[in-house]
Amino acid sequence: MSIRASLVGVAMATVLIAPSYSPVQAGGVYGWHLAAIGVTEELHRNRRMRGRVNVGVLDQGALCSHTELSGRCTMYTHPNPALGGGPGDHGTHVSTTIAANDKGTGGMVGVAPGATIWSYSIFGSAGFVGYADGFLPEDCRTCYGGNIIDYFRDYKKVSVTNHSYGAPTWPPLASEMRMFAEKQNKNIVTVWAMGNDNKDVRNLVFQNNFQARDKLKNLIFVAALNKDLELAYFSNTPGENGFCNVTSQVCLARNKYKYFTVAAPGMEIYAGVANGGYSNMQGTSMAAPIVTGVAALLQGRWPSLKKNASKVTSIIFRTAQDLGKPGVDAIYGWGMVRADRALGPLGAKYLKKKKKKYSLATSSLRVSPALSNLTNQSVSFFDEYDRDFQIPLATYAPSYQGILRNWVKTTEGRNDYVMDNGRGLSYAFSAQDYNAVDPSLADIEWRMSYQRDKGEALHFGQGSALEQLGIPTSFSFGLMTDKTIQTGAYPVMGLAEGGVYALFQRPITSGFSIAGGALTNTSLDSEAEDRDYAPETDAMVISLGRVSDDTRLSTKVSVSYLTEDNGVLGTGGAGGLDFADGSNSQGVTLGSSYQLNRDSKVSASYTEAFSRSDASSDNLLSLNSARLTSSAFAVGLESKSVFDGADRLKLSVSQPLRVNGGSMSLMHDDYYDEDEVLHARSVDIDLKPTGRQIDYQLEYVFQPKPSGSTLGLFAYYADDYLHQAGLVDYGFGLRVHKSF
């Protein structure tokens, strides 16, 4: 029901009135009414319609040749003007409010610009003619027996209808509305303007008919709001009345009108009219098509909702912005319709594969830099209404993947305690504050060692094991870029760093030595283990090294074997993104160190790794049968006594572990189509990243006198950070080391 300017109602309030108007300015393509309900250009772009939505507009006929409707509108009217006429301003305004495509000169867009309008003229020169048999097109006047609901649904596939006319005190309205309510099996969302009489809706519409809300589950009443988001001065309200059986005086609380009511902007609504131009109009007639448009948006985005009208009404009610008294009230019902909220996920969220559900709340994926290309993919999840949404796997990036541009990093003071019995047995204990940047680091590291003069050594501890394996780890700075899988030295083993380890070293003959051991990221500290991002990993290593006769050249070949119970190269998941069968990796590291002079040496290492997995087909993500190849390298220079006898300078260039070849399969349930058939999506993901991260690092360490502390000034620059082309990271800072 509409009014212009200050015209609230006249004796013919049940009939559509089309007074004269003057063209006005739009005030922006996305007018105030769209802004109020959260409809923006971004929303239209990100929630594009996937399928055709047919909207039935029972009103005056619409000007389907209007630029805003051209190609998406058909008007039906009776040849006898007394039984149906048009087009009219009111019908055109309602239709363009729903579906204007922003192609006209007026500068406006509808709530659902992709919708198709089926305009049915129910007003003739004699006023309201309703749904008479003669209203239907010639080809269906007899086949549908004049039943407009059947015609809508079966012949035109209409899934939402707009009714901006009538008043609850008007006797013909009851029978017409009842017809729609009784045809709930047709799954048509029925949106009805509440009226412009400025009073409660009385118990006259459905008298003697309905006692159960499920008979009316597809119905929405709409009240009108002004620009202050308050009830428009003319708008009817739901009150505390309901759909009752007058004879038995039964009126269940759940059947009160307020539980079927939302509010929408209904004043100064700018839209098209019947001369091809535009005008402002107001009334609950203007509020109703806004709600109709939101219903069309929902059905267009998720076509399966066209057969689930009750889901549409539930979503609209549930996501309305509460107005007035908290909760559902007698003035605003559920509150103001909000398209942005309605188009977002609701309730429980889950991933699906072969209809098996995995709770999104308990599903997680940690993506390592080595497999960073995985973060460029998206996966579908469903809400409780079976609507699909896309979520990027980048959401599951590990905590240390945050970009640290221009961040001045300071490592807190670290205390080392060393005890030595003088006979080769020593105990080292190191404590540091929890590092929020890299939560995989434990607060406490410790080591027990037994060493003999002949170079034999045994190490058992918790924390960093790489330092106990000798070259070429000497240029590790303790920066973020050096931790675990980011290091250029033993990167495959680095995936198992942080937990318990046991290592040995033993000379054999002619300058050769052997070293090896086992390590795991499992910590004896349960609190530290809970913070660790990585899946449980274990590694074994055996190394053969040789020192030249002049002791200037050291070389080492290491073979490592890594098992990950729920991941591959540091990437692991849980729930729907679980790598249930894990993976194994074999790595070969070649390292060398050359002493240039008494105070300077250069070191280098190169690692090649191969990974396989027997991931189950039940998993959404699985490594393909072909092996995954990866590599890392590092080159460093260390010089002592640069300015005094107690300082040193370190330079390094390194590439963290990076996948060179291989792919992963992503297979999951993707969406429901219009026939409610569930479709799956399968994607082969090339895991080779878009870039190659190269780290440049510099550290200068010195001991200020007379203090016993050691200070380190460091800076680094990472090109193609996280192996993402064009991404950079850089930083500088100060490290403080105190020994007691």
Image: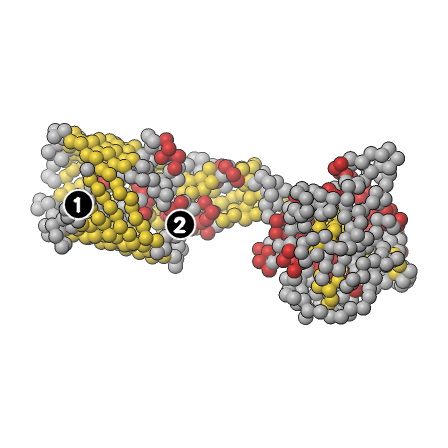
**Which disc, if any, is residue 301?**
none
Q: Which residue is mark 1?
A: 707
**Does label 2 or label 1 sit earlier along the sequence?**
2
Residue 549 picture location, percent across and down: 8, 44
Q: Position of residue 420 (x, y in %)?
A: 15, 31
- The C terminus, quarter of image: top left
> Amino acid type of disc 2?
Gly
Q: Residue at x 29, y 35 (%)?
A: 444
Q: Residue at x 39, y 34 (%)?
A: 530
Residue beneath the point at 79% across and 52% down? 198
For disc 2, the neighbor class at 10 Å (few under 14, some 14 to 19, many from 20) is few
Instruction: Inspect the image, locate mark 1, and give the three-letter code of the amino acid beneath it.
Output: Ser
Identify the element where label 1 is drawn: loop
Q: Is residue 21 left or right of residue 522?
A: right
Q: Quarter-wise, where is residue 690 in the image?
A: bottom left
Residue 558 in the image: above or below residue 1: above
Find disc 2 in the rendering and name its residue.
Answer: 402
